[in-house]
Amino acid sequence: MYKKLMELIEEKKYQQVKRELMEMNEADVAEVLENIDDGATVIKIIRLLPKDLAAEVFSYLRVNTQRNIVETFTERELTKLIEESYFDDVIDLIEEMPASVATKIIKSVGKDKRALINQFLNYPEDSAGSIMTIEYIDLKEDMTVGKAIENIKQLDLDDENINICYVTDATRVLKGVVPLHKLILLDDNVKIGKIMEEETVAINTNETSENCANIFKKYDIVTAPIVDNENRLVGIITIDDIVDVIEQEATEDIQMLAGISPSDEGYLESNAASLAKNRVVWLLVLMVSATLSGMIIREYETLLQSVVVLVAFLPMLMGTGGNSGSQASTLVIRGLALEEIKIVDVLKVLWKEIQVGFLVGITLAVVNFGRIILFEDVETKVAIVVCATLFFTVMIAKMIGGVLPIAAKKLKLDPAIMAAPLISTMSDVLVLLIYLNMAKLLLGI
């Protein structure tokens, strides 16, 4: 199918392309358009599509492609595109665009919608208010089932937003919810207040988007009402918004685990200067902190010159220490993200890592001692120094790797900052201090 479409596009048979695309899923159409190198051709195809399909496809396109379309479209074309788009998608688009492009988008909408957009843009970034949509079904307690169904039929809502109806009073205070299927099965004269479910999971507008995702997971829900501080219903969040949040949070954690400042831009969309800026900060921090290792080596220079063979084991010890700490921190960071580990569990985590560190440390030390004795031409005392250092390094590195992410969480920092690069740098210093002092003590130098 893809090959056929590309051939039709190359042959400029756009009406046939239109017919083929109208039979495809919106996400697949967007993927086809993203693979077209010529921006003018992409815009031409978008213009050919029915406005409702064009709006759906537009929401799946990359930011750079969206920006090119917005900048090229006339005010009339842009107005039609925005009118057909979901409100939360419009908000996301405005937040991603440069100021000049965002201004053009806002100008293309009506006065009432413009006021709502400005209200949404005032919510904190990555909050429930910033990702919610205002497209939902609002019913009243004294409304009959028949009247409710009649009102729902008149609404222009996507099916993802009508599986749950929200019941509010005259001041928009959330009172409860009614599943749509329940309305269909009941008599038309039954009052909504009699059948609504009063206990419902509501999320405050200022709740973080990450916590929203945790709430969806905890209660196994696909949509949730968003309320202000007075419990007034202002919008809803649907599962597709939460999937985007999960993807974004996972991407940020992966970037931080690698010592990279998080960025919303995709790899191919970012220029070299932007990528360098996101990476160089942590590299500078780690480079400066790594100078501590050099200072320690200089302090023990005489010892190393006396027993030169000690230097040969440094890479193995430092690498094992860093890897041990990284293993522990990765598991704890993931546990914190899934809320399997709480801040109050710090002593449980510490005790578990002590046990793990002991078992792993003993295993590595014994295996390494045998390897050194069999294959290395060194004194037994040196082998003991190396293996004792290995044992204590693994123990302490795992304790540090387990506790530091929890400490970061306690300080309201992202636990992912206590990731592999930082743990490795800290363990290097730890290895040198243990190793060289152990050598000094056991070798009598």
Image: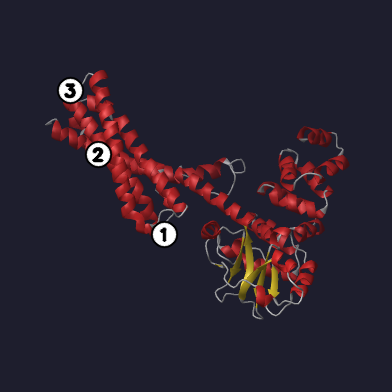
Indicate the position of residue 437 as horizontal and vertical percent values: 18, 37
Please state if 379 lies on the left or on the right of 430 as rendered. left
Cβ atoms at labels 2 and 1 below 8 Å apart? no
Q: How many marks?
A: 3
Give the residue drawn at x 35%, y 39%.
324
Residue 392, label in figure = 2
Sequence order check: which comes first, mark 2 or mark 1?
A: 2
Q: Secondary structure at mark 2?
A: helix
Residue 379 circle label: 3
Image vertical order of residue 291 relative to residue 180, above or below: above
Residue 232 locus on image (x, y percent): 60, 75
Vertical side of 372 occupied by 326: above or below: below
30 or 143: nearer the eye? Answer: 143
Element assignment for label 1: loop
Name which residue lies at 21% across and 37% down. Answer: 299
Residue type, numbered disc 1: Lys
Q: Earlier in the sequence, mark 1 or mark 3?
A: 3
Q: Amino acid at mark 3?
A: Glu
Write the residue at 23% across / 39% down.
433
Q: Which residue lies under the disc numbered 1? A: 412
Residue 137 lies in quadrant: bottom right
State how far apart marks 2 and 3 are (Cα).
Answer: 20 Å
Q: Which percent across, then down, holds residue 338?
A: 47, 52
